[in-house]
Image (spheres, rainbow, N blue to C red):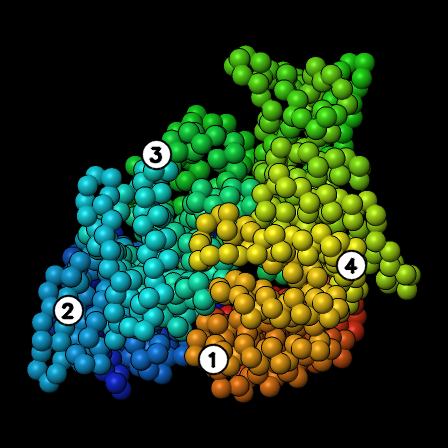
Amino acid sequence: PKEIFLKNYKQPDYYFDTLDLKFTLGEESTIVTSKIAINPRVEGQSSPLVLDGRDLKLQSVKINGNVLKEEDFYVDSRHLTLKSPPSSKFTLEIVTEIYPQKNTSLEGLYKSSGNFCTQCEAEGFRKITFYQDRPDIMAKYTCRIEADKSLYPVLLSNGNLIEQGDLEGGKHFTVWEDPFKKPSYLFALVAGQLESRDDTFTTCSGRKVSLRIWTPPQDLPKTEHAMYSLKAAMKWDEDVFGREYDLDLFNIVAVPDFNMGAMENKSLNIFNSRLVLASPETATDADYAAILGVIGHEYFHNWTGNRVTCRDWFQLSLKEGLTVFRDQEFSSDLGSRPVKRIADVSKLRTYQFPQDAGPMAHPVRPHSYIKIDLIHYFHYQGAEVVRMYKTLLGSQGFRKGTDLYFQRHDGQAVTCEDFFAAMRDANNADFANFLLWYSQAGTPVVKVTTNYNAEGRTFSLKFSQEVPPTPGQPTKEPMFIPVAVGLLDSSGKDMPLSSVYHDGKLESFSSSGQNVYTTVLRVTKKEEEFVFNDVSERPTPSILRGFSAPIHLESDLTDNDLLFLLAHDSDEFNRWEAGQVLARKLMLSLVADFQQNKALVLNLQFLQGIKSILTDSSLDKEFIAKAITLPGVGEIMDMMTVADPDAVHAVRTFIRKKLASELKEELLITAKNNRSSGAYEFDHNNMARRALKNTALAYVGSLEDPEITELLLNEYRTATNMTDQFAALVAIDQQRAIREEILADFYNKWQHDYLVVNKWLALQAMSDMPGNVENVKKLLSHTSFDLRNPNNVYSLIGGFCGSPVNFHCKDGSGYKFLGELVVQLDKINPQVASRMVSAFSRWKRYDETRQSLAKEQLEMILSTEGLSENVFEIASKSLA
Ligand code: B3K
Ligand code: ZN
């Protein structure tokens, strides 16, 4: 496998103006005819034209209508090379045969539940036809689709439908024309037995857009929320970013077999059906929220990704970081901003930070890769980088920056520097070394010490920063870190800030006439100090409000300071964070006790803190639910020199049980007072009630007590929506005596609904029951499980790998299970297999026994013949 480097980027020698595609869809194979209008970059200059292609059977090549002679081209397993094409404008016509029915990788053209669909990002188009499959090749496409009319009554592609009709032999056709030029990764085709929910949206300039969400007929009733989400996204993008939709038609298709969440193909978004289909009876609040976010995300790509696209795949964050940021903001505006921020930071800590501290660490803009799909996993760090521009420039400055970005680059394939330059130029901003966020990997560790000088009435914050070494980057430069700070007085109120002294300069806040309570300090050096003046009493500082930068913060705040912030901080994110810092400290100290066989004792102050949050009726209920939830096992393991899953799990279970028994009465009252009444509504207040009630139930579920068992069974049986029913099931899952029976009951009830069955699989996979690997193995041959379906794999195998005690079981059974499965899965679907193999990537964090067991599996995987590049890259980098 070959590594590709950013520094080797070269402009293409040929540009493509138009591409006319024709698909003849068949049951054995599909014939693809492609006609490309080509221009050499330098007129009169001919060089070989190398087209990408995989698993294609070439039938013919013509240039300007003439069949190309054998000696003028050659084909290998990855390319079609034209040795010396014309040196001025010409047309190239290529016919290939492909086999979508045999395509289990779910990349390129494939079949899902009897329907044809495509997935081209990042490099799937080369599995459809020979092409320069790179995003800086932007062309105008037409697409003609021919297929059997009864099997495939609906034939869709990008853009506008310009022609359709019947053909001989029971066949029919459609012709689609996309007026916007696009890179090949945004091409899409769908054919099958689908029906649509139709609606319209009138844009800000008064254009009426047809909206269609396509599913198999029986699923149509479950598309109401998706349609609501789409319309909300279209309106929001106009209001907040000034972006109007640009075609008269927008299609969404839901398919059951899809490698990831969804895909933003121009005007024909294709979705994993779990992110479209929802009804109150079958989908949880989390599903509803995810649908809103992802429908928004894919829609927002129309401007950030499609109209302005990436020059090359190293620039991926240009579209993904920005679009993730946009969907986070969208969900914040439609729900609760602080609660959304807490959820997003939790994701950053659960997924991004561990990756950035392991063998797969790479900067927001990587310097090299083998398979770009692996860089595709998450873009939370890229979104944080975009968020920092907004924090530094303010809402208006940020909007000026995006306006300039769209104005400059509409229709172009550009780079991260272009985005940076638009932000800078629109605001005449001084951004010092901000670009380092794109090129340096690793999460900065920022230490801060505070000091109050009563005599001088000053309060100082001394910062030092360090970016840890990552593969290929042993030493780092200091980063440009925006740190939002406020000061609380002894009554817990924000103090108005007078001025701050830094680097020989005094910045005064009083001039505007308005009180300033939060300021953004620009920390740019390895060590530096900021001094607040006119501070009338010793303050409690609230540092990194709203998580203004993606860093690990270590401060000298005492437990009392943290408890004070937990009780009073006006910044709700930091209020939550104070509780989390306390919980992390507590858990780490109990882990040490556990490892030394000491009895575990719960700190009373902590218990008191949780109790006062739980019973504070002035707080948002979803905020309470988040604030009483302990940091995850992974987060605590990440803070240990040698990760000890058994100890962390034991400690977390201990604290949960202890809190449940000490606060049983309060938890039961909370659960009772927040029971659902009336029909399901997807709005913040109702979701918050359910979240709080269900968090309380999960706590009490940890107690073995007949009264509780009865209560949970009642919750389970009387639930009128999936949020409540599944939460009851999760709580019951802790009740060993009735667990099996209720799990079976749930399956019987929902076996017809594959999306609900995935929840059932995941719940069992994540169980901490000793020896659960055996149960998971049994489920592999369950009638409702299919290794070819990514959602099934993510639920059962992904769920299992997230279980600290069973996956990391010291007898090696969990690792062996995953190792064997990865080898099997890689033959079916390399992308899905590589996601699973990443569970091994941080094996060096564990004790020696676990290390050697995991290493053995990685070596076994690497020695497998015919391994995919995807799995190879992760397994080999993990071992390096
Ligand atoms: N852009 C796609 C992700 C593609 C991943 C390809 N391996 C969808 C998204 O950003 O939501
Ligand atoms: Zn995206």
Q: Looking at the image, which residue is at 57% across and 56% down? A: 675
Which residue lies under the disc numbered 1? 751
Residue 802 seen in render? no
Mark 3 and mark 1: span between their CA atoms?
52 Å
Q: Nearer the viewer, residue 128 or 818?
A: 818
Q: Nearer the viewer, residue 156 or 743?
A: 743
Which residue lies under the disc numbered 3? 404
Residue 597 location in percent, x, y?
Answer: 90, 64
Given this view, does label 2 or label 4 mark the residue nearer the observer? Answer: 4
Mark 2 and mark 4: span between their CA atoms?
65 Å
Q: Nearer the viewer, residue 631 or 136?
A: 631
Q: Earlier in the sequence, mark 4 or mark 1?
A: 4
Left or right: 863 with respect to 38?
right
Query: In the image, what residue type sits under mark 4?
Result: Ser
Which residue lies under the disc numbered 4? 661
Query: In the image, what residue type sits under mark 1?
Result: Gln
Ligand 1 within 8 A of label 4's CB? no
Given this view, does label 3 or label 2 mark the residue nearer the observer? Answer: 2
Above or below, 517 relative to 659:
above
Q: Residues within 10 Å of mark 4 (few under 14, many from 20)?
A: some
Q: Secondary structure at mark 2?
A: strand
Q: Quadrant of the C terminus?
A: bottom right
Left or right: 120 with respect to 779?
left
Given this view, does label 3 or label 1 mark the residue nearer the observer? Answer: 1
